[in-house]
Image (cartoon, rainbow, N blue to C red):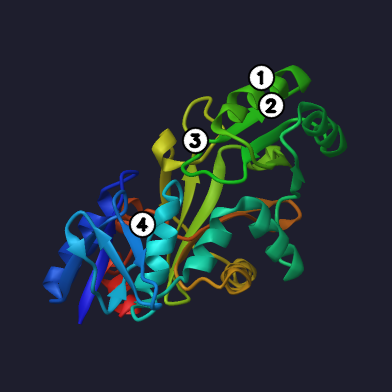
Amino acid sequence: MRLGVTRNPFESNAPAALIAAARHLPVDVRVIDLATVRAEIGSDGGAGAFDRDGPIEVDAVTPFLLYGFPAAAHAYRVITRRAITQNSVDAILTADDKATTAHLLATAKVPQVPTHVVPPDLAEVLAAADRLGYPVVLKRTHGAQGRWVRRAADGAALAAAFDQLTPEGPGAMVIQPEVVECRGRSIRVVVTGGRPLVAAERVATGDEWRSNINQGASQHPTDITDEELGLVTRSIEALGLGHAGVDILRTADGPRILEVNACPDFTSMQPHADRDLAREIILASL
């Protein structure tokens, strides 16, 4: 059994943890370089995947990221023709798209933060904010680690946020009301093999309103309720994911899904887990 572990430029902690855990099992590891991975498709229907280290031949792959590397999606379609994976390429692309995620959660009747999807037109963005009521949160449909997310308390701030996000290129915008009662707080649940491994409450520091760890938030272990567990299960089923990080807001009206990530960095939550998360992810991936 040869296991593919993806190395990506956004973070190194998770790949390093997975590689170390695989070697202790032991499992043969082929590190895949996300930035250089490519597909080669022949006229006879044959196809292969390659990166800077040559051909990629693996029997299974651990969860992988696709955002920001469009060629990688095509290469991983080739890789997963024969390799086992918890998350299909289509499921990952779906989870990477916040608008599509919101649509599928709504279809599955999963309670979530209200979401309006609007064209990249300032007048449409302002009109959506008026319908929702300020303060609002403006996002690009694709993004990670809170980088493409802006909060706006009024129309002037929203116009400034729009100007900051539009240089990234064309694409729909997602606008949501800020859940003020949950400002700077969220619950992250890491799931693998379709079952929760660990849950933590994340708390922002200072004036920061985002509860992202890379934005300086702290976290502590928490128990999730049966209702929250049900939302997690229904969310990953709606998106077709076996591995995910599900973010929940505990509102006065009950828990609401904020976001679903197909390839969360689990390493910051290891101190709060009662098992080796990397090992569990590998075992679920084989």
Residue marked by disc 3: 147
Mark 4 lies on a secondary structure that is loop
Q: Which of marks 3 and 2 is in front?
A: 3
- In the image, taking residue 281 as reference, residue 236 lies left or right, namely right
Residue at 26% of width from left, 64% of height from top? 5
Which residue is nearer to you in this view: 53 or 48? 48
Q: Which of marks 1 and 2 is in front?
A: 1
Residue at 31% of width from left, 44% of height from top? 9
Q: Work out how far the residue at label 3 is from the one at label 4, CA to CA, in angstroms.
A: 18 Å
Residue at 56% of width from left, 38% of height from top? 184
Choose the circle earlier in sequence order: 1 or 2: 2
Choose the circle earlier in sequence order: 3 or 4: 3
Q: Work out how far the residue at label 4 is from the one at label 2, CA to CA, in angstroms.
A: 30 Å
Query: Residue 23 placed where, x, y %?
Result: 12, 69
Query: On residue 152, which mark appears?
Result: 2
Q: Which of marks 3 and 4 is in front?
A: 3
Rate crowding at label 2 as few (under 14), some (14 to 19) or many (20 or more) other CA atoms within 10 Å: many
Dividing the image into 4 quarters, which one contains the N terminus? bottom left
Residue marked by disc 1: 160
Query: Residue 114 placed where, x, y %?
Result: 76, 50
* Figure quadrant of residue 269: bottom left
Mark 2 lies on a secondary structure that is strand
Mark 3 lies on a secondary structure that is loop
Rate crowding at label 1 as few (under 14), some (14 to 19) or many (20 or more) other CA atoms within 10 Å: few
- The answer to the question of whether label 1 and label 2 lie on touching residues, with beta carbons closer than 8 A, is yes
Q: Is residue 75 above or below residue 60?
A: above
Type of the residue with mark 4: Phe
Which residue is nearer to you in this view: 260 or 201? 260
Choose the circle earlier in sequence order: 4 or 2: 2
